[in-house]
């Protein structure tokens, strides 16, 4: 069974780009457009990895991480790649991130860099 990735972004173009690339790599993909939807889908789908923008409607990507950590159990162990084009977001990320499970990817990024990070975290599909 392929490994499952939850992709979260409110920009459809970014979701479509990631979807096109990660699907060709063989991953099973689920998407969400805001933080609240991301949290619900994480609970339902139990993905192997979450890739999320920081700035989202309803709940930030950081809030999603904090909520997953508060839930404990397997949900708190899901690795998360947080993306942002704002350098100040990276500084805030380090205030609460667990370096064993949380990773930061600056936008814009090369899709090859995304694939390499995904494979490093959860292996090939």
Image (cartoon, grey):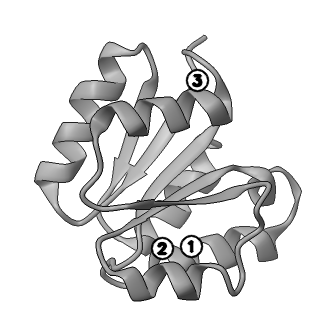
> Relative to residue 92, is residue 55 depicted above or below?
above
How many labels were placed on the picture? Answer: 3
Please name the residue that numbered disc 1 is placed on.
64
**How far apart, in angstroms, are the residues tagged by discs 1 and 3?**
21 Å
Closer to the N terminus: mark 1 or mark 3? 3
Q: Measuring 53% from the left and 38% from the top, which residue is drawn there?
A: 117
**How far apart, in angstroms, are the residues tagged by discs 2 and 1?**
5 Å
Q: Measuring 55% from the left and 78% from the top, which residue is drawn there?
A: 62
Label disc, if present, on residue 3 of the rendered structure: 3
Q: Is residue 31 visible?
A: yes
> Relative to residue 5, is residue 88 depicted above or below?
below
Viewport quadrant of the N terminus:
top right
Residue 35, percent across and down?
43, 72
> Relative to residue 36, is residue 77 depicted above or below?
above
**How far apart, in angstroms, are the residues tagged by discs 2 and 3?**
21 Å
Label disc, if present, on residue 48 of the rendered structure: none
| Callout 2–callout 1 Cβ contact below 8 Å | yes
Q: Is residue 96 left or right of residue 50?
A: right
Q: Residues within 10 Å of mark 3 (few under 14, many from 20)?
A: some
Q: Residues within 10 Å of mark 2 (few under 14, many from 20)?
A: many
Residue 3, image quadrant: top right
Q: Measuring 27% from the left and 34% from the top, which residue is drawn there?
A: 19
Element assignment for label 3? loop
Residue 120, percent across and down?
63, 31
Q: Is residue 71 left or right of residue 15?
A: right
């Amino acid at each position: 069974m392929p490994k499952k990735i939850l992709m979260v972004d409110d920009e459809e173009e970014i979701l479509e780009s990631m979807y096109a690339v990660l699907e060709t790599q063989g991953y099973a993909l689920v998407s969400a457009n805001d933080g609240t939807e991301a949290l619900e889908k994480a609970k339902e789908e139990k993905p192997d990895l979450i890739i999320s923008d920081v700035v989202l409607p309803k709940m930030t990507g950081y809030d999603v991480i904090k909520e997953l950590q508060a839930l404990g159990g397997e949900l708190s162990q899901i690795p998360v790649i947080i993306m942002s084009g704002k350098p100040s977001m990276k500084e805030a990320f380090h205030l609460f991130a667990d370096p064993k499970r949380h990773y930061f990817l600056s936008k814009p990024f090369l899709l090859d860099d995304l694939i390499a990070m995904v494979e490093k975290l959860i292996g090939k599909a």
